[in-house]
Image: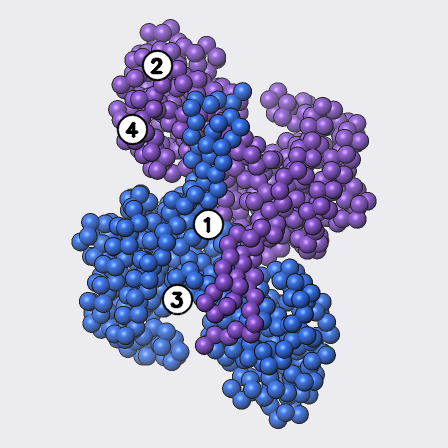
Chain colours: A blue, B purple
């Protein structure tokens, strides 16, 4: 443990040195570096894919599930996709130096709040090699030095990618320590989240257990990401065809991610019409339905199998083809249910009633509130942010999809002619 | 401890209920409430002053230093000042509902990022009764329910003030739990900072020990405030009359606060001219000078007493009439010194050299960087924010003076016509 702390502290110190350089880099230099990284990763695709095959072989031997193997796998096409993401980052505006607010005070002082990098940012994430490159790219563009701790199942792939990026940065005259990879086991996580004063921010991405551990033990500032028990509420005044499309898309488009819907609430005045259609379509798509009494009756009448919904189901983030379905007597009951079970990630209402939509968007406490749209739109790419570093479910600093701007802080610059307090 | 946690958790739960109401209050209602609180506090001034006298008697018996007694003391005039601060808050714009960013996506989705309250905010602070009212007022205006834990030396005063505010809120039909006071001893602090999921944010104000304790033990998000080892750097190209005024004002205007200067760095090319004048004036004002070799010689030649500066002095936040003074060979040396010893609060340069000013403002990593102005201007009131809840020295969420906007989060509202992901 002590060795791990010393090693991580040292990584943070060399990252700090790199970050001072990065903070002053003009946009053109950062964009040129991003394009150089993209080219180098494509040129090194064979090495990366070979390293990835070693990870996959190891994972297969250890019984890694097929969906996790797929998330870990890099093909030459996927490597090109990863490189293209860096080129897209180069095309995005640079947030550093933006003037957020400013004014001239009565005493003549000119005050400006200016966007600056965080400094040294740690990231802890699952075995998804594309995140390694995205995080390095987002860090570089926002002037931050990144310390990455990827899932150990992707160790060889991450090492290959980071080696290419560090070599390329050094070759073009930028600090290699712009991106570092921690590979010292679990203790590194503990060391990283307690490197107070050395690391400015840690972003954990992953399951609820990781997030809880990090938040409980960290002394470094943390942004929580991602547990999503997202609801779709079909209001009394919903267009039911639209509601059907949104419910099915929110659940089935990509069930393994945090913005997929986990619960469907249906207003009782449309339940008789809507439930048979939506349950048949969801059941037909292979969704395991956890239903309340009224929805169970509708499912049985439609010949769709279902299980009685439990309190644990209502609270669960399944991340799978499972959905809790229930009938609510009113908008108020839907709001209460969401306040009780929601995780403040994404909540959707389907309605043509202006007043219901306004109440839902005002009263639901969540990072993103959707009206007549799929929960799946909570995404940095969909919002036009370019690559995304995670989805914040906390209220401090960043809420919802996080990208370049969320990796920045600000600094006040005050200019005068000798003003003093009287 | 368990009793304390249960009591604080319950306070947070009733605060949550109040916060739901507050989040939806229109500005007019909040401003009317602030004015009603101001009137009630003035009308109850006699009770408040009597309670304050009990605290002062207790403090005097316990040997409370005169400067802390002064900070604790409320006279009828000071009570009116506290009430007026609430009226000034009523006149400030309401941040809630502001659209921070927004766009229409290619698929027709309308996306807006809207400012919303944090929810339930805890505040831990020293024995300054005006903070009790300021915090309650800032919370109300920004739609947050506040849980206050003031210094125990002000217990009777705080109880009187909070009682008046709660009674008034109830009388005008708003939740009394908009403001609550914890009075259960030290365990309440521990309970408050670990009330995860119940409290959205805790702001500790006070000495370095309190801040360290809170940051280390908290599982609730925290904004660190205020340790300030602020430097004034007098550049080679400084106007020396201006530099004299700024150095003296930064140190002596109010030495007990975090934006007072603690260190003076002088470029060697102006040291021979500047040091005798500034040391004589500071010494004459009663400042204890900790001087490096060259500054010691200048002090002795000017007949000003001084002590050799130590590494501990350079690192210290004296909060008193003491100043560390040294000569640096270059702007780079000044930047290095500030990077080593600064606390990222406020750093000032005095110079007429555009390039030096630009380098200083770009390269110094601090919440506020001053050019040709006193460090004492780092203040929410001076910046035009109205009442201030503290000065953040962290990079996450808020940096520098914090007021209404810093007590808010955001929510994304996405409106569509049935869009789904393809």
Q: CA distance from mark 4 to mark 3?
A: 44 Å
Q: Image check: A54 left or right of A204?
A: left
The chain under label 1 reads A
Q: Position of residue A394 (x, y in %)?
A: 53, 56
Disc 3: CA contacts within 10 A as few (<14), some (14-19) or many (>=20): many
Marks 4,3: beta carbons within 8 A:
no
SS under mark 2? helix
Q: Residue furthest left?
A: A171
Q: Give the Cα separation between the discs numbered 3 and 2.
A: 58 Å
Q: Element under label 4? A: helix
Q: How far across and how far down the image is residue B304, in percent? A: 39, 9
Name the residue located 52 percent from the left edge and 61 percent from the top edge.
Answer: B111
Q: Which residue is mark 2?
A: B275
Across the whole image, how many numbered discs are drawn on residues?
A: 4
The answer to whether the residues at label 3 and label 2 have Cβ atoms under 8 Å apart is: no
Pick the front one: A50 or B173: B173
Q: Are marks 1 and 3 in contact (CB under 8 Å)?
A: no
Residue B346 in sight: no
Q: Quick one: SS at disc 3?
A: loop
Label 1 residue SS: loop
Camera-side mark, 4 or 1: 4
State which chain disc 2 sits on.
Answer: B
Q: Which residue is mark 3?
A: A126
Q: Which residue lies at the image location 49% right of the left edge and 47% below the top edge?
A: B397
Rendered location of residue B161, percent (x, y):
73, 35
The reply to whether the C-beta atoms of the residues labelled 2 and 4 are less than 8 Å apart is no
In the picture of the structure, the residue carrying the numbered disc 1 is A221
Q: CA distance from mark 1 to mark 3?
A: 20 Å
- Rounded to the nearest angstrom, the CA distance separating label 2 from label 1 is 41 Å
**Relative vertical location of residue B102 with respect to residue A250 in this rendering, above or below:** above
Chain identifier of the residue bearing label 4 in the image: B
Residue B20, quarter of picture:
bottom right
């Amino acid at each position: 443990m002590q060795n791990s702390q010393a090693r991580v502290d040292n990584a943070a110190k060399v990252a700090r040195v790199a970050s001072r350089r990065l903070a002053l880099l003009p946009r053109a230099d950062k964009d040129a570096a991003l394009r150089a990284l993209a080219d180098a990763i494509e040129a090194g695709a064979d090495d990366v894919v070979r390293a990835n095959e070693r990870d996959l072989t190891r994972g297969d031997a250890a019984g890694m599930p097929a969906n996790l193997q797929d998330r870990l796998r890099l093909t030459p096409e996927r490597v090109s996709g990863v490189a293209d993401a860096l080129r897209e980052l180069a095309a995005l505006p640079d947030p550093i130096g933006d003037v957020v607010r400013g004014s001239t005070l009565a005493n003549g002082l000119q005050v400006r709040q200016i966007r600056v990098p965080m400094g040294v940012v740690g990231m802890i994430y699952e075995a998804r090699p594309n995140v390694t490159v995205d995080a390095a790219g987002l860090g570089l563009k926002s002037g931050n030095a990144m310390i990455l701790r990827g899932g150990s199942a992707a160790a060889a792939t991450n090492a290959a990618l980071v080696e290419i990026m560090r070599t390329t940065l050094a070759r073009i005259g930028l600090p290699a320590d712009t991106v570092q990879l921690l590979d010292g086991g679990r203790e590194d996580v503990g060391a990283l989240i307690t490197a107070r004063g050395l690391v400015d921010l840690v972003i954990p991405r992953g399951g609820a257990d990781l997030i809880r551990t990090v938040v409980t033990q960290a002394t470094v500032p943390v942004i929580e990401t991602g547990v999503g028990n997202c609801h779709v509420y079909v209001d009394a005044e919903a267009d039911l065809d639209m509601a059907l499309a949104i419910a099915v898309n929110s659940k089935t488009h990509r069930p393994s991610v945090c913005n997929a819907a986990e619960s469907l609430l249906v207003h009782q005045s449309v339940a008789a019409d809507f439930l048979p259609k939506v349950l048949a379509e969801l059941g037909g798509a292979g969704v395991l339905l956890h239903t309340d009494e009224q929805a169970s009756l509708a499912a049985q009448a439609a010949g769709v199998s279902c299980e009685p919904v439990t309190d644990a189901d209502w609270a669960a983030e399944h991340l799978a083809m499972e959905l809790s379905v229930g009938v609510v007597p009113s908008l108020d009951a839907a709001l209460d249910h969401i306040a009780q079970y929601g995780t403040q990630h994404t909540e959707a209402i389907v309605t043509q009633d202006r007043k219901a939509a306004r109440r839902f968007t005002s009263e639901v406490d969540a990072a993103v509130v959707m009206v007549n749209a799929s929960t799946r739109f909570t995404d940095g790419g969909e919002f036009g942010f370019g690559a995304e570093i995670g989805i914040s479910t906390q209220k401090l600093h960043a809420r919802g999809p996080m990208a370049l701007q969320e990796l920045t802080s600000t600094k006040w610059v005050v200019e005068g002619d000798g003003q003093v307090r009287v």
